[in-house]
Image (cartoon, helix red, strand yellow):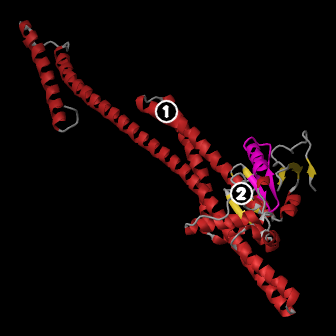
Amino acid sequence: MAKAASPGADLGKKGMASRIWCVLDSNGEPVTLDMDKAAVMHRAGIHARDLRILDPLLSYPSTILGRERAIVLNLEHIKAIITAEEVLLRNPTNEHVIPIVEELRRRLPLQTLENGAEALALLERTDSKKSGRKSSVQSDPERGEVTPFEFRALEVALEAICSFLDARTTELETSAYPALDELTSKISSRNLDRVRKLKSGMTRLISRVQKVRDELEQLLDDDDDMAELFLTRKAGSSTLTPALLSNFPASPVLGSKLSAVSRTKSLASTHGSDDDVEEVEMLLEVLSLRTTRFICFCLHLDMVSFIQCYFMQVDGTLNKLNTLREYIDDTEDYINIQLDNHRNQLIQLELVLNAATLAMALYSLVAGIFGMNIPYPWNDDHAYIFKWVVVAGCMLCVGLFSIVMAYARHKGLVGT
């Protein structure tokens, strides 16, 4: 059972999903309801497995599902069910969902399918664009194009998620590029940790954008899934035909045909036989059916068009993230080259120190031999030889060090 939620109502125990739903009708009037799963399934005409996709406690990828009576949306924080008459939005108190509710309130009541003249004007504008001719029916730019209710709601959701992901990407770029430039100029633990966190955030954001992009791409590639989103057509042509028939005269092209058939029907009913009347009625029914099918086809093309636009927007966001990832990879390569260069310099320094240690070890050997406290006869009366031993030892050590360094340079182990 659904009931209006009071402002101070308890949202449930800790760890349980919120049951608060915001319901917006075709007039854009929001009503906050506290509904359990059974009430939502009965109201929207969906199964439990579809409602489970919208459970915030479960991790489901971005999904757009078309069902017999509803469209199930799971796009990041946007978890909604769209029917032909209303939108059910989960967790409307979320800071990211509140702007979507306001946008739905603003855009849902602007257009309806009740005005058949506008629908026909849209069809003629579409035909004129394809044929390159100027349309004979002028549209009111303030009223916008005619689209079914579910298309408008779906467009608001796609626009919101594309703007959200693009804003997150812009924030990441604003933080990442200066951090990478600072790391390039100065390699430190602080800068490395900062870039590491930014790269982790970028990886998660790429995954989220990729899921939305894949879902839109799959939707565009499958005509059957796309047709499932047209709830108004599945509800029956009766929702379109009466309004369009009553407004046909507003179209110079289709209206003239219907007017001619209507006049023929009037004359047949006045002066003709019942067979003539039935034949004209059948002709009128066929004409209205073909017109309704043509309108549905054009609306289907319109839906494909705006979904493709948002797909391109998400694809552009993904390209920006891939560019940022390439920039990070290039920075990592540059940092690795710098670190390798420093490592090579340390190895060269170690080689020089080892060569110097070898030379000093030889000199220490001479000092150790002559410093032994062992009596031997040739030590007597040879004090003058001490300076020659010292000088010869130093020259021998320097020569050995020079030979080692020359060999290392010859082999390319040290720089010239």
Magenta stretch bounds: 79-107
Is 147 drawn above or below residue 187 in the view shown?
A: below
Q: Is residue 52 visible?
A: yes
Circles 1, 2 touching at the beta carbon (< 8 Å): no
Mark 2 residue type: Leu
Q: Which residue is mark 2?
A: 154
Read off the residue under disc 1.
178
Image coords of residue 72 (percent x, y): 75, 60
Q: Earlier in the sequence, mark 1 or mark 2?
A: 2
**Residue at (58%, 38%) from the top-left corner?**
171
Neighbours of disc 1 within 10 Å: few (<14), some (14-19), many (20+) = few
What is the number of callouts on the image? 2
Residue 416 position in % (x across, y down): 19, 31
Splitting the image into 4 quarters, where does residue 81 fall? bottom right
In the rendered image, which quarter is residue 168 located in? Answer: top right
- Dot 2 crowding, Cα within 10 Å, few <14, some 14–19, many 20+: many
Which residue is at 71% across, 51% downward? 142
Q: Quadrant of the N terminus?
A: bottom right
Q: Indicate whether 115 appears above or below 197.
A: below
